[in-house]
Image (tube, rainbow, N blue to C red):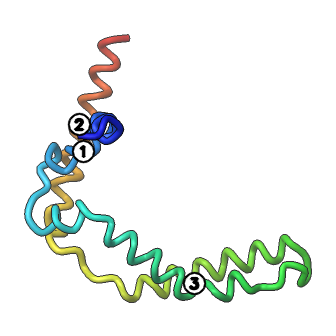
């Protein structure tokens, strides 16, 4: 194995095992272990962002451009949202949130005892 790859794997071990530690399984696991959802949003934004890129920065000042660009970007995200599908296995999310909250409270308790 490549030394650099092994080092990266060791550094990312906690993040790689997060879904397993939280008890995520089945369809939700399949949806979360890839970056497909994020890439889908990025692709949608790239497809619609030409108005933001081509907006004239000199028109009525830079502050106005910044505000309008932010509004356009928000509109792009809202448009992209219309194409989102329900995540398979979403029913599991409530129990995962409870698990996360439990782990957080355990970590806080450990820190308080150590202090």
The N terminus lies in which quarter of the figure? top left
Q: Are marks 1 and 3 in contact (CB under 8 Å)?
A: no
Q: Residue at x 39, y 69 (%)?
A: 38
- Residue at position x 25%, y 79% from top? 86
Circle 1 SS class:
helix
The local crowd at label 3, few if under 14, some if 14 to 19, many if 20 or more residues have their Cα within 10 Å, is some
Is the residue 31 above or below the residue 115 in the image? below
Q: Residue furthest front?
A: 2
Instruction: Give the residue pinned by disc 3.
Output: 75
Could you say where residue 50 lies in the image, as x and y percent from the top left?
Answer: 64, 87
| Residue 104 visible somewhere in the drawing | no
> Between disc 2 and disc 3, whose residue precedes?
3
N-terminal label among 1 and 3: 3
> Residue 57, located in which quarter of the rendered image?
bottom right
Q: Which residue is mark 1?
A: 100
Q: Secondary structure at mark 2?
A: helix
Q: Residue at x 27, y 33 (%)?
A: 105
**Which of the labelled discs sits on residue 103, or is there none?**
2
**Residue nearest the observer in this picture, 80 or 90:** 80
Give the structural element (helix, strand or loop) at label 3: helix
Above or below, 29 relative to 103: below
**Residue contact at pointers 1 and 2, CB within 8 angstroms:** yes
Work out how far the residue at label 2 is from the one at label 3, CA to CA, in angstroms.
37 Å
Answer with left or right where residue 9 lies relative to residue 71: left
Residue 3 % position (x, y): 31, 35
Asked if residue 80 can be seen in this view, the reply is: yes
């Amino acid at each position: 194995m490549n030394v650099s790859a092994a080092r990266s794997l060791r550094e990312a071990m906690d993040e790689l095992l997060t879904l397993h530690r939280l008890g995520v399984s089945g369809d939700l696991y399949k949806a979360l272990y890839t970056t497909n959802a994020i890439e889908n949003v990025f692709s949608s934004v790239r497809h619609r962002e030409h108005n933001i890129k081509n907006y004239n920065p000199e028109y009525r000042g830079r502050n106005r451009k910044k505000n309008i660009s932010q509004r356009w970007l928000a509109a792009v995200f809202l448009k992209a949202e219309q194409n989102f599908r329900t995540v398979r296995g979403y029913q599991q999310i409530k129990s995962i949130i409870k698990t996360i909250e439990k782990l957080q409270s355990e970590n806080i308790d450990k820190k308080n005892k150590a202090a």
